[in-house]
Image: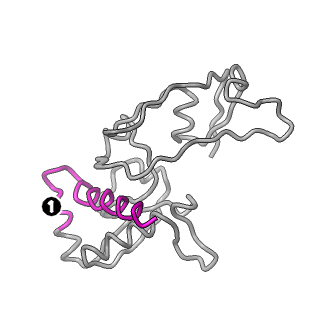
Amino acid sequence: MKTSLKLATLAASLALTLTTLPAQAGAVLDRVVAAGTLKVATDANWAPQSFLNASNELDGFDIDVAKEIGKRIGVKVEFVTPGWDIITAGNWVGRWDMHVGSMTPTKKRAEIFDFPAVYYYTPAAVAVHKDSKAKSLSDLDGKVVGATTTSTFEAYAKKDLTFDAAGAPPFEYKLNPKEVHSYE
């Protein structure tokens, strides 16, 4: 876990310097250090990466990463929890300095964001009803499937997923659904 946290901290530290256009990267870090506060946007509903715990405090892997970045640059961390649609819109207008959270670096998102490094990969899984006859992904071919709206999984199911990250592992589409329904 310590190695993972170090890698995540390195990646997220790089993200801090690349939050805006490259020519402005130093200005963001300078502003954060001068203010003594790093404003970090994260999703409060994405356990185990970031979530509200039983004490109603932000907790999780991404929260730990953000706190470590703040510690290493000598500033306090202030979290904001805008909706995912606001985070992914990319027009932050100074509301926060960086986003620390799980986001697949797709080509579409790379038009808005800089992805300096990928610090972990999450495998996907398919869930079916316990009485389903589907035992493999191919058993869902030609069926109607559901996925979270605007997610990596929806893009995969619709065969519209393209990574924009150095070193991203190759993948192939192994699902051929009849239709994909998107859910919030």
Place of residue 105 in the rendered image (x, y in percent of width and height, measured from the top left): 39, 42
Query: What is the number of callouts on the image?
Result: 1
Residue 31, given in percent of the width and then of the height, sits at 19, 70
- Give the residue at x 51% y 60%: 49
Q: Residue 16: x and y, percent?
A: 27, 60
At horizontal 45% and vertical 62% (from top left) the residue drawn is 42
| Secondary structure mainly formed by the magenta segment | helix
**Disc 1 packing (10 Å; few <14; some 14–19; many ≥20):** some
Left or right, residue 20 beside residue 40:
left
Residue matched to label 1: 26
The answer to whether 59 appears left or right of 97 in the picture is: right
Identified by mark 1, the residue type is: Gly
**Residue 35 pos. (x, y %):** 23, 77
In the rendered image, residue 28 lying in the magenta stretch gets the answer yes
The answer to whether residue 95 shows anywhere in this view is no
Element class at badge 1: helix
- 150 vs 7: above or below: above
Of residues 165 and 180, which is closer to you in this image?
Answer: 165
Instruction: Identify which residue is drawn at 16% across, 69% down.
Output: 30
Q: In this view, does 109 lie to the left or right of 123?
A: left
Residue shown at 42% from the left, 67% from the top: 2
Q: Is residue 26 visible?
A: yes
**Extent of the magenta region:** 1-29
Residue 144, picture quadrant: top right
